[in-house]
Image: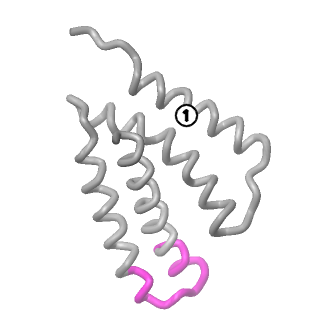
């Protein structure tokens, strides 16, 4: 369930930031900010659902998921194919996220 929460949070964060990006950089109407704000609120609320004893650990692990999801967004929404360096970098970040989430913890 944690991974689904992370992926859903990533979608909402990227969509929210993309709305602001589109308004500021692509001359979209200011009304784009309303769904953007709603998406960012949903993103923040979802991260509070991650089962961990420390918010910082949840946020750190999320970072790797966010990077990989951003490249999927790049490909599917912005129609720009990630290159080998994008993919290698995302792979390193996912490995780091897995280490943070699955690493043994001292009791």
Q: In the rendered image of this protein, does residue 34 appear above or below residue 48?
A: below
Q: Is residue 81 left or right of residue 2?
A: right
**Crowd class of label 1 (few under 14; some 14 to 19; many from 20; radius 10 Å):** many
Q: In the rendered image of this protein, does residue 8 appear above or below residue 28?
A: above
Give the residue pinned by disc 1: 94
Q: Residue at x 57, y 54 (%)?
A: 70
Image quarter hosting the C terminus: top left
Q: Residue at x 47, y 73 (%)?
A: 20
Q: Residue at x 32, y 72 (%)?
A: 38
Q: Does residue 72 belong to the magenta stretch?
A: no
Q: In the rendered image of this protein, does residue 61 appear above or below residue 80?
A: above
Q: In terms of depth relative to the viewer, which is nearer, 24 or 41?
A: 41
Q: Secondary structure at mark 1?
A: helix
| Res. 39 image quadrant | bottom left
Q: Does residue 30 belong to the magenta stretch?
A: yes
Image quarter hosting the N terminus: top left
Q: Is residue 91 left or right of residue 61?
A: right
Q: In the rendered image of this protein, does residue 47 appear above or below residue 43?
A: above
């Amino acid at each position: 369930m944690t991974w689904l929460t992370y992926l859903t949070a990533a979608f909402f964060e990227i969509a929210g930031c993309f709305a602001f990006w589109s308004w500021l950089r692509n001359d979209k109407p200011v009304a784009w900010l309303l769904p953007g704000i709603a998406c960012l609120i949903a993103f923040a609320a979802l991260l509070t659902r991650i089962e961990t004893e420390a918010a910082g650990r949840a946020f750190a692990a999320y970072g790797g998921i966010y990077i990989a999801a951003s490249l999927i967004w790049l490909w599917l929404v912005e129609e720009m194919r990630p290159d080998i360096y994008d993919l290698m970098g995302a792979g390193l970040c996912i490995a780091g996220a897995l280490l943070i989430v699955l690493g043994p913890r001292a009791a």
